[in-house]
Image (tube, helix red, strand yellow):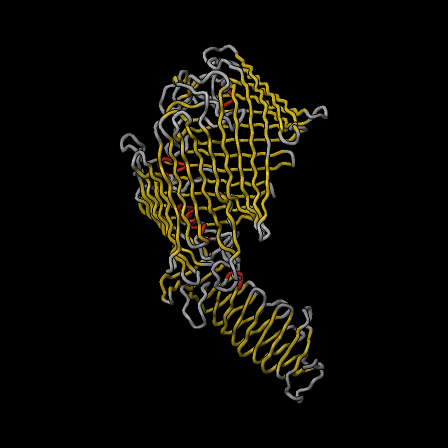
């Protein structure tokens, strides 16, 4: 095979030939065929028989091809196949402008690789490698074998497809196994989260609110702003909707806000709602959101809002157990600026009472402070630090007050003794000034100090194995002595931990042991991380303990705002309970490669990896040395077998009696106090999921109160994926003590999915087995056809 001259005539032998040509403003074209003729007067190539044309990354095969050099027009007929990195085109006839890559396809089929999209049509217009328009054809993302019927596809009169952008249909039907099911006169749907358009409607049922319908419209205002408008109707509650606005100002400044409104027509059928004396017809709303503004490298502004029209909003309307249990909604504005040797901040905080609090709840309006990090003012081993702040405590009912808190501190770098023991002395002095006392309008103040001496050591030994790996065993003993003199706390208003500084004459000793395996192939595995700690009261024992029982009247103040908390007499002990925490296995998820797996059309995972592997046991317990029994015993066990199944079991048990206080403002690992006796608590949690051979992945999670014999919540979910994973169906059932909710989610790969409250539950329970797969009814960061992972919802976002 040789290169042929452009002067080759039509009478030459029809042997396999190759030619090169360069249309205007295009890359060179290489032509191979059984016969190539060049018509010099017309500057046209005629190639016939097993034609192969290559231009850069584009390859074309056909029975016959005509290339007109001046206009850059290529006409191919007979078994035409055009392939480039993003697209495959099969057709009877293809006309293509090699300069612009635009063209016309007759009776053809287009395969868009990035989204696994198949478009067929009587007439297709190609505007670019990503943009097509077709007449009288079909559209699907299913992997159907040649000649097989896809699980779903749209038939249409007219379609406009822009891969990764949008799809617009006219005169269409949604067909399941080629049976027309849903007529679609016209539809424009975004294939990207950054394109405006209607999202898939969400239809559901809730035994509290009845049937519901939600239709969202996504408006991409510009590349850095978008707005989602979501009207919603409930047959047994009322109507309303959500407005969600997101924006990005620059790489470090962004925000997200939600306004949820409900025009209530009927009382919600939930516990805690009295049918009498309630305003049935009323407007209820929630506003929540966050904003982060990095003004410059040294100045950061952060705002958070959470406001509801009435305290019962979350309790009656939210499906989130965590939101329903919120004691209050917090809104705040924080400004932070770095300065030499430290940081300045200004904080405004407002707490809206929900489950607790009232008009006498203290608000921080405002608080500002200055923090100095440890630095060496004299260039020696002595480190200086300081925390100082001013707070204006305001409330609608009751007295207000100001507080000034100044706490300088001195410490040294670790002083090594024989490279075996390290000693670290520390000293902090605290002065707190109040504009008034708890029982007097005169100002009060309090001085105290914290002195400590800590000794630590570390022993390590490494063991090598025959395969090149090894084990590392470390033992880290430590002892710390702390002293805080007694102060009179009865004269001051006790609002937070700054006001709670009990005396301290305490010796705390601890031991940490770790066994880490170094794997020869790379990576590591945690076999054991064990910590033991106990405190000993050098001075007098504790005689009174704080009582946090709900509804107990404090010594001073109200139930909604205690000023001096209630206390009860206790029989204190010299030795605290022994704290034990053991972690066996890796709590951090691991992603392992899938052997022999590569991306291909119809592959399930598509990213060459299996889901996260979590295999661990965590034990957190307290042993009462006087009774020889466990006062607290908490465990979490999780085991996962690749993407086949996983189980996790948790248990919480606290015996009746005093509960150990873990740490304080001075030292987080010390046990200086116990709280007032509390009743026994015992409950378990269990969850897991497994795959079936029939395409279903089933999971559940439940909570059970063993002491009271009831279940506050359990969730059951299931997801069906057809063999080629071009569509999926999700089902969920949520059972609360006073409510039940069930719904479904449908996903068409590459088109979109329905989304509702159950999406988060389904994703939480099943995603450990489905990581990286396509066709899921939620955003899958590792999936080849999923949308990018969205920004987290703002705290307090609620979907009634």
Tell me, yes or no, if residue 191 can be seen here.
Answer: no
Residue 420 image offset from top left, x and y in percent: 63, 31
Q: Quadrant of residue 240?
A: top left
When the figure is inspected, residue 134 is found, relative to residue 433, above or below; the finding is: below
Is 780 located above or below residue 412 in the figure?
A: below
List x then y, in percent, for residue 755: 42, 50
Q: Nearer the viewer, residue 456 or 490?
A: 456
Asked which quadrant contains residue 422, the reply is: top right
Quarter of the image with the C terminus in it = top left
Q: Is residue 345 above or below residue 640?
A: above
Q: Is residue 521 left or right of residue 561?
A: right
Q: Position of residue 659 (x, y in %)?
A: 41, 26
Q: Quadrant of the N terminus?
A: bottom right
Horizontal relation, residue 571 to residue 116: left or right: left
- The answer to which image quadrant residue 97 occupies is bottom right
The mark total stands at: 0
Compared to 427, does 294 lie above or below?
below
Query: Is residue 517 in sight in this rendering?
Result: yes
Q: Position of residue 663 (x, y in %)?
A: 50, 27
76 or 756, nearer to the observer: 756
| Residue depicted at x 59% and y 47% | 464
For image coordinates 47% across by 21% down, the residue present is: 495
């Amino acid at each position: 095979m040789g290169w042929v001259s452009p002067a080759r005539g039509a009478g030459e032998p029809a042997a396999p030939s190759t030619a090169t040509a360069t249309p205007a403003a295009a890359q060179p074209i290489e032509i191979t065929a059984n016969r190539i003729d060049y018509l010099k007067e017309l500057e046209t190539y005629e190639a016939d028989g097993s034609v192969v044309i290559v231009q850069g990354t584009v390859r074309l095969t056909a029975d016959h091809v005509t290339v007109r050099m001046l206009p850059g027009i290529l006409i191919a007929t007979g078994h035409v196949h055009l392939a480039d990195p993003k697209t495959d085109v099969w057709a009877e006839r293809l006309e293509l402008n090699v300069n612009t890559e635009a063209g016309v396809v007759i009776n053809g089929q287009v395969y868009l690789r990035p989204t696994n999209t198949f478009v067929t049509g009587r007439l297709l217009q190609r505007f670019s490698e990503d943009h097509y328009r077709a007449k009288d054809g079909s559209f699907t993302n299913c992997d159907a074998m040649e000649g097989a019927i896809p699980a779903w596809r749209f038939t249409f009169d007219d379609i406009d497809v822009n891969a990764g952008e949008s799809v617009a249909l006219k005169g269409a039907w949604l067909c399941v196994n080629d049976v027309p099911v849903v007529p679609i006169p016209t539809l424009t749907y975004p294939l990207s989260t950054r394109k405006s358009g209607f999202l898939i409607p969400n239809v559901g049922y809730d035994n509290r609110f009845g049937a519901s319908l939600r239709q969202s419209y996504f408006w991409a205002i510009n590349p850095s702003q978008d707005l989602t408008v979501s009207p919603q109707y409930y047959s047994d509650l009322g109507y309303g909707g959500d407005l969600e606005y997101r924006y990005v100002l620059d790489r470090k400044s962004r925000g997200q806000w939600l306004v949820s409104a409900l025009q209530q027509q009927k009382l919600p059928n939930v516990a805690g709602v009295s049918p009498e004396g309630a305003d049935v017809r009323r407007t209820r709303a929630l506003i929540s959101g966050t904003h982060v503004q990095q003004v410059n490298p040294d100045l950061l502004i952060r705002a958070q809002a959470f406001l509801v029209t009435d305290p019962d909003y979350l309790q009656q309307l939210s499906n989130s157990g965590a939101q329903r249990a919120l004691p209050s909604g917090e809104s705040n504005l924080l400004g932070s600026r770095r300065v030499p040797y430290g940081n300045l901040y200004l904080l405004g905080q407002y707490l809206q009472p929900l489950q607790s609090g009232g008009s006498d709840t203290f608000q921080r309006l405002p608080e500002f402070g200055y923090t100095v990090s440890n630095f060496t003012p004299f260039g020696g081993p002595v480190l200086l630090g300081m925390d100082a702040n001013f707070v204006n405590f305001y409330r609608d009912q009751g007295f207000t007050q100001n507080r000034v808190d100044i706490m300088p501190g001195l410490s040294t770098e670790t002083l090594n003794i024989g490279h075996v023991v390290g000693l670290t002395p520390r000293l902090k002095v605290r002065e707190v000034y109040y504009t008034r006392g708890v029982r007097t309008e005169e100002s009060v103040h309090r001085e105290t100090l914290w002195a400590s001496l800590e000794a630590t050591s570390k022993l390590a030994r490494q063991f090598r194995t025959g395969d090149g790996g090894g084990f590392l065993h470390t033992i880290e003993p430590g002892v710390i002595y702390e002293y805080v003199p007694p102060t009179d706390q009865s004269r001051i208003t006790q609002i937070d931990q700054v006001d709670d500084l009990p005396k301290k004459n305490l010796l705390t000793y601890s031991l940490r042991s770790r066994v880490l395996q170094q794997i020869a192939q790379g990576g590591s595995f945690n076999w054991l991380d064990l910590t033991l700690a106990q405190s000993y009261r050098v001075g007098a024992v504790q005689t009174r303990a704080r009582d946090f029982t709900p509804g107990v009247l404090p010594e001073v103040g109200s139930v909604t705002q205690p000023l001096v908390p209630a206390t009860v007499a206790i029989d204190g002990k010299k030795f605290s309970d022994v704290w034990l925490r053991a972690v066996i296995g890796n709590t951090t998820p691991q992603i392992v490669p899938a052997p022999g797996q590569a991306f291909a059309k119809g592959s399930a995972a598509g990213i060459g990896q299996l889901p996260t592997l979590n295999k661990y046991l965590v034990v957190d317990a307290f042993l009462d040395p006087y009774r020889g029994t466990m006062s607290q015993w908490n465990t979490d066990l999780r085991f996962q077998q690749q993407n086949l199944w996983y189980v996790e079991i948790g248990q919480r048990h606290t015996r009746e009696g005093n509960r150990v206080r873990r740490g304080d403002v001075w030292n987080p690992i010390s046990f200086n106090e116990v709280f007032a006796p509390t009743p026994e608590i015992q409950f378990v949690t269990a969850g897991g999921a497994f795959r079936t051979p029939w395409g279903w992945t089933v999971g559940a999670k439940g909570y059970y109160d063993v002491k009271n014999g009831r279940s506050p919540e359990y969730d059951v979910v299931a997801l069906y994926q057809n063999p080629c994973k071009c569509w999926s169906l999700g089902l969920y059932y949520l059972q609360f003590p006073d409510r039940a909710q069930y719904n479904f989610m449908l996903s068409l790969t590459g088109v979109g999915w329905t989304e509702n409250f159950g999406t988060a539950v389904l994703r939480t329970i099943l995603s450990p087995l489905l990581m990286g797969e396509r066709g899921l009814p939620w955003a899958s960061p590792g999936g080849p056809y999923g949308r990018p992972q969205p920004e987290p919802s703002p705290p307090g976002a609620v979907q009634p």
